[in-house]
Amino acid sequence: EHVGAGGPEVDIAVDPIEGTNLIAKGQNGAIAVMAIAEKGGLLHAPDMYMEKLCVGPRGAGAIDITKSLTENIKNVAAKMNRNVDEITLVMLDRERHHGLMKEARDLGARIMLISDGDVNPAMECCIEGSGVHMVVGTGGAPEGVLAAAALKCVGGDMQARLKPETEEEIRRCHEMGITDVNQV
């Protein structure tokens, strides 16, 4: 949508209620989120899933979404001068994450499962003493764009890639100018 009467052109990403289900259940943790960047600075993300791997400033540079979760946890722990069993991962409590949960638990890392809203924990991993060191898993792509913008502002790090599940979603990506749906 184009708005305004001049000045610099910008991209805007908005989620008026990140954590809609939290609000519906009367729970805490829902937030309103907006990111603004220079034109072309934000991915115009289709409404689909995105695989995400987030860390705060102390873990920045230690992640690689093309590597195993085990390797990423070990790398983040080393970068943060912590033992693996001192690393806490946040992920959405979804069946699709059971493999990630097992892998992290087998390694000895801690897991905090949340019901909804993965932008908040991405920001929490940037707050010293929050107890959150990594956010991993698959969630909404538009929320991933907002999380990435927040992390960039405070020196955190995020890697992500779209996870289209149907040919229709792949076609939609192509129509939106995303030619490589597997690009990190």
Image (cartoon, rainbow, N blue to C red):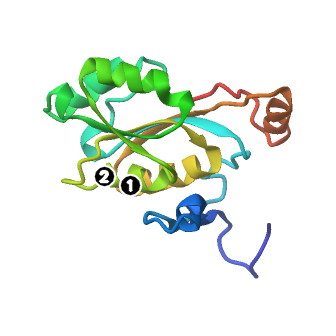
Task: Provide the residue designation for mark 1.
Answer: 123
**Image height check: is 92 above or below 2?**
above
Judge from the rendering whether residue 112 lies leftward or rightward of residue 39; answer left or right.
left
Looking at the rendered structure, the secondary structure element under dot 1 is helix
Q: Amino acid at mark 1?
A: Met
Judge from the rendering whether residue 169 lies leftward or rightward of residue 85; answer left or right.
right
Q: Residue at point 66% right, 52% down?
A: 40
- Residue nearest the viewer, comparing 170 with 102: 102
Task: Provide the residue designation for mark 2.
Answer: 126
Residue 181, x across and y down, in percent: 70, 28
Decide: few, some or many residues near mark 2? Use Cα within 10 Å; few <14, some 14-19, many ≥20. many
Decide: few, some or many residues near mark 1? Use Cα within 10 Å; few <14, some 14-19, many ≥20. many
On the question of residue 93 being in view, the answer is yes
Q: Amino acid at mark 2?
A: Cys
Q: Residue at point 54% right, 64% down?
A: 25
Do the CB atoms of the residues marked 2 and 1 lie less than 8 Å apart? yes
Looking at the rendered structure, the secondary structure element under dot 2 is loop
Q: CA distance from mark 2 to mark 1?
A: 5 Å
On the question of residue 37 being in view, the answer is no
Residue 70, x across and y down, in percent: 34, 19
Q: Residue at point 70% right, 41% down?
A: 48
